[in-house]
Image (cartoon, rainbow, N blue to C red):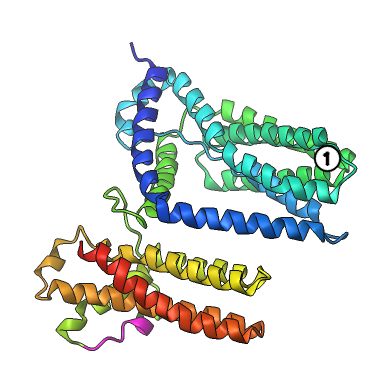
Amino acid sequence: MFDSHAFFKQRFAAHLKETSRYLRYIFNGHIAFAMFFFVSAAAYYYQQWLANLPEDFPTNWIIGLTFGLLVSYSPVRTLLKEPDLVFLIAAENKMGSYFRDALIYSFVIQLYMILLAGAAFGPLYFASYPERTGEVYLLTLLIVLIFKAGNLAANWWILKIREPGVRWVDQVVRILLNLAVFYFIISGEMVWAGVTTVLFTLVFLYDLSVSRKQPGVVWDLLVEKDRERMQTFYRIANMFTDVPHLKNRVKSRQWLVSLVSRVPLAKNRTFDYLYRISFVRSGDYLGMYVRLIVIGGLFIYFVPNVWMKLLFALLFLYMSAFQMMTLYHHHRTVMWLDLYPVDIKVRQQSLFKLLFQLTLIQTVIFALLFLGMKEWMGMLIALIGGTVFNYLFIRGYVKKKVTA
């Protein structure tokens, strides 16, 4: 007798074992230190900023839209795999307990974002609305949880429809209603909040009625959605350790390729060309590099203390070099590289050279940001100190890791 509840527990245990193995590498000592530094600095300046909060600050927009987006993003994690398309379809009428457990699991693992947002926005909420009590805010968070469960159920029902256009329209309508509901709740306009809640309930009931008319589960869509989410997780984990399950995405980016691929035709420049092309065309490295520059630039711009700006500049330089060093193992499954008549030291030097070039560009950008804020001393320290830090970190830590 097939027990879908027991099958889900087995699948969940295997999933937990696999993800926890990679999470240990993601949240290693380096990332833990960086996160602690970020949280401590952000909490300190957040408290100072709240003490001088402008009266016209759009708290209702910020909290309302954030809560609306959090409840709108409610993907269903089924933990299904490609072989299930063959072996489980025949048992579809016995999979009720499995999908119920999957919905509960999906709800629970998404609670942490709501709890973090609730804790982060609490001081802002009470600073903006001192006349409101803690019970009012807790009631708001309870409504967030109710809408989260409602959106999760609606997402599950709409996944029974194969047409992507129908699913897209339904998602857009619910996002707009979620944003409106929580904007009105935070603003204290309860009449309008009630009206938009009624509209959301009508859409919710419509999704339920449509799903009941569908013949069954769209198995291939569920497998595809879960595979995409796991690939996203693998891409993040691949920046910290080797992930054999990762299917690398390649993008053309022809104009960037033509810009960075101007390398002399020489044997000792083989890996210069390969690493440059991999950095540009891979779906991970370029995006991560740009995001770290943008986020680091925002910290440098908004943090008031110049020494804290410099610490953040060095921290983001470190994170960029640390993330990009995985380029060395990017082609580990391509055996043809071992046939290249190129010494291993040449390959390593090519990586060190590219990392230094990337971090040097980032250093110059941060220094120009200091220059734009007329922090002359900060610009000089960022430029000189950043360059020295890049060289020492790459020739010290990165070299030790690559050659080990």
Asked whether, in this view, residue 44 is left or right of residue 163, the answer is right
Q: Residues within 10 Å of mark 1 (few under 14, many from 20)?
A: many
Q: State the residue at coordinates (41%, 52%).
A: 29
Is residue 263 inside the magenta stretch?
yes
Q: Which residues are magenta?
A: 258-264
Percent x, y of residue 274: 26, 74
| Near-viewer residue (137 or 392) | 392
Name the residue that disc number 1 marks: 193
Return the residue found at the far top: 1
Depth order, front residue of 18/311: 311
- Taking 212 as reference, is 300 above or below it? below
Percent position of residue 196, x then y: 80, 40
Q: Name the quarter where the N terminus is drawn.
A: top left
Q: Does the segment drawn in magenta span residue 300?
A: no
Q: Is residue 276 left or right of residue 38?
A: left
Please, what is the three-letter code of the amino acid marked with disc 1? Ala
x%, y% of residue 263?
27, 86
Q: Which of 225 and 9 lies nearest the eye of the viewer? A: 9
Question: Does residue 368 appear anywhere in the picture?
Answer: no
Residue 48 image position (x, y, % from top left): 74, 59
- Residue 388 appears in the figure: yes
Question: Residue at left 14%, top 61%?
Answer: 335
Q: Quadrant of residue 275?
A: bottom left
